[in-house]
Structures are given as C-alpha cells and as structure tokens.
Image (tube, helix red, strand yellow):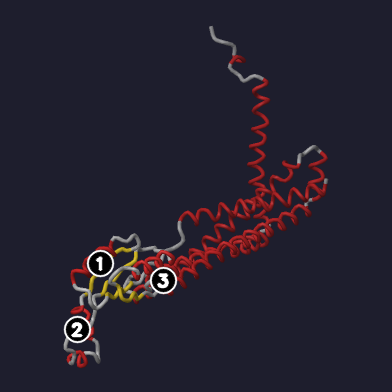
C-alpha cells in the first residue's frame, strides 16, 4: 500500500525554515543584478568613476613592475660582482690553492677561480701600451689572485661580511670589492619597496573615498524611495544591500581596468627591454607582474569597494532614521 503523498512533502516548520534563506538568497541575486543595471543606466558617470579608480590602482602596479625590473637590471650590471682577492707576493702556488679551497667553503661564495701570475701577465701583455713595458721586467711581480663569485641573492650585509672574512684570512694582501654599489642598490630597492607600500595604501584610501562618495550621492538622490521602503518595514540591511553590490561592481571593474593598464605598460616595455638585453648579452632577464598579483588586485579592489559602500551607506541610513 502506497504512503500518503503528504508524508513525502516537507512539513510546515521545514518550509518556514527554508523560506527566509531562499528569500535572502533571492534578494542578494536581485540586488546584484539591480545594482549592475543601475550602473549601466548611467554609463558615462559609471565609466568615469571606474576609470579614476582604475588609474589610481594601476599606478602602484606600474611602480612595482618598474622596481622589480630595476633589481633585474642591477643583477645584469653586476650586483653580485666578482671580488678580487690579491694574495701576498710571497705566497706560492700550493698555498694559493689551499686558500682557494678554504674560500670555496664559505657560505656566501658560489665559486672561486685562481688566477696565476703568469695568467695575469698574459692579460696585461694583450692590453695596449703594456707589452713594451713588460719586456724590461726581470721577473713577474704579479701575485696570485682569487676571483670570488658571491652567491646569487646575497644581501649587502652578507656581502660586506664576506669581504671582511676574506680580508682576515692569512696570506691575503688586498681585497678589491665594489660593495658600495651593492649597498646603494639595496638602499634604493628598500626605498622603492616602502614607496610601493605607501602608494598602495594611499590609492586604496582613494578607492574607498571615491566609492563612498558615489554611494552617498546615490543614496541622497533616492531618499524618498528609501523612506517608502522603511515605512513598509524594510530593514537597514535590506535597504543598503544594492549599494553594497554597487561598491563591489565599482571595485571589481576598476581592478580589472588596473590590471589591463599594467599589462599594456608591460607590453609597451617589451621592445626596449629586448634591445637592452641584447646589449648585456642576454644577461638582463626582465619579468612581468606575477599571476597571483594580477588576480589579487580585482579581488582586493572589490573588497575595498564593498567596504567603502558599507561605511557610507550605514552612516547615511543612520542619519536618515
């Protein structure tokens, strides 16, 4: 015998529990669509707002792109330049080889090349103006030289410590290092990093203000409509929900625009960078913006738009209460 149909249907309490969630979900969908249609109904104003926010967000991205490539340029110009260690004149080949192996074991050293006095004399003889002068020498006055290549990514402090360790080794006469170049470059990159953070914070605040002012104007222009909604029992959350979605749309579209502008800047630099890379024999490897950053910008901008709309709409509706 079949069970009655009403036994399979949800109970009244179950329907009453599902109805609020269903209504809440439907209103979110309606609010998202209504706010998007409202933006489309005034295309010029919406596009101007999105353009201003997109340009503001694109500036930190462009500066970040420039800064990351300055570091690549510094590496190509010799950020990790070879450190020349001149041994004392009384050092023999055996001592020089032992010292080279000791230097190779240092944590900050990538490789060590031992240059003999004969090799140094041969290099000098190939230089214009030295060949005649070298013929009058009775013996070779050049010392053994260790060419020390620092490890990639070595910081300025670690490089300075490496130079101090080399100077303190027995048998070392002079250490020739361009540490000031590394220190200046690291200092410049440090300033740039801080500037990127400050710019990102300032333009994020600008996004909040632009979205907040746009939502404020929209709420003010719809004061009568909001009053009617309150009279029929609409809650503040119900009333402000479309404005929150408007802030999300503003932020999302401006973030997408900022990413597009940054990619255009990156594309415009491809030709000059390739020519510059050829000058440095392919050592200059210039990269673009990382994918995670390109994805994070629209999401972050949407959150900023929501926050700006949330703060202003709550304040406006509280005043109108």
Q: Mark 3 points at which residue?
A: 74
Q: What element carries label 2?
A: loop
x, y percent for residue 208: 67, 57
Q: Which residue is drawn at 17% across and 91% down?
A: 135
C-alpha separation, residue under disc 1 versus residue under disc 3: 27 Å
Q: Please, what secondary structure does the residue beneath circle 3 have?
A: helix
Q: Mark 1 points at which residue?
A: 100
Toward the top, the furthest residue is 1
Taking 158 as reference, is 221 left or right?
right
Disc sitting over residue 140 in the figure: 2
Point out residue 169 in the picture as x, y percentages from the top left corner.
31, 68
Q: Which of marks 2 and 1 is nearer the N terminus?
A: 1
Toward which corner of the image does residue 139 lie, by quadrant? bottom left
Rounded to the nearest angstrom, the CA distance separating label 2 from label 1 is 21 Å
Q: Earlier in the sequence, mark 3 or mark 2?
A: 3
Disc 3 to disc 2, C-alpha distance: 36 Å
Q: Between residues 247 and 84, which one lies in front from this camera angle?
A: 84
Camera-side residue: 130 or 39?
Answer: 130
Q: Where is residue 300 in the image (x, y as percent from the top left)?
A: 57, 53
Question: To which quarter of the image does residue 95 belong?
Answer: bottom left
Camera sees residue 307: yes
Whether residue 257 is situated above or below residue 113 in the rendered picture: above
């Amino acid at each position: 015998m079949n069970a009655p149909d009403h036994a399979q249907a949800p109970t009244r309490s179950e329907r009453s529990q599902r109805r609020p969630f269903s209504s809440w979900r439907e209103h979110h969908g309606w609010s998202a669509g209504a706010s998007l249609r409202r933006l489309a109904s005034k295309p010029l104003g919406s596009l101007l707002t999105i353009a201003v926010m997109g340009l503001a967000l694109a500036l930190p991205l462009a500066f970040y792109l420039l800064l990351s490539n300055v570091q690549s340029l510094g590496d190509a110009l010799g950020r990790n330049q070879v450190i020349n260690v001149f041994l004392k004149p009384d050092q023999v080949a055996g001592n020089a080889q032992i010292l080279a192996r000791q230097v190779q074991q240092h944590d900050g050293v990538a490789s060590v090349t031992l240059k003999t006095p004969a090799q140094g004399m041969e290099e000098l003889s190939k230089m214009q103006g030295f060949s005649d002068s070298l013929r009058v020498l009775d013996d070779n006055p050049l010392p053994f030289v260790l060419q020390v290549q620092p490890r990639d990514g070595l910081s300025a402090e670690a490089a300075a410590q490496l130079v101090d360790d080399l100077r303190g080794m027995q048998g070392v006469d002079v250490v020739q290092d361009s540490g000031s170049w590394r220190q200046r470059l690291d200092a410049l990159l440090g300033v740039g990093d801080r500037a990127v953070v400050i710019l990102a914070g300032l333009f994020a605040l600008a996004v909040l203000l632009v979205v907040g002012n746009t939502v404020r104007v929209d709420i003010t222009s719809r004061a009568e409509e909001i009053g009617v909604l309150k009279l029929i029992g609409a809650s503040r959350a119900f009333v402000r929900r479309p404005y929150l979605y408007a802030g999300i749309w503003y932020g999302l579209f401006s973030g997408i625009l900022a990413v597009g502008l940054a990619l255009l800047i990156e594309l415009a630099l491809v030709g000059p960078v390739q020519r510059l890379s050829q000058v440095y024999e392919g050592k200059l490897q210039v990269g673009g913006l990382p994918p995670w950053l390109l994805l994070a910008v629209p999401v972050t901008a949407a959150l900023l738009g929501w926050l700006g709309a949330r703060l202003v709409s709550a304040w406006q509706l509280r005043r109108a209460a």
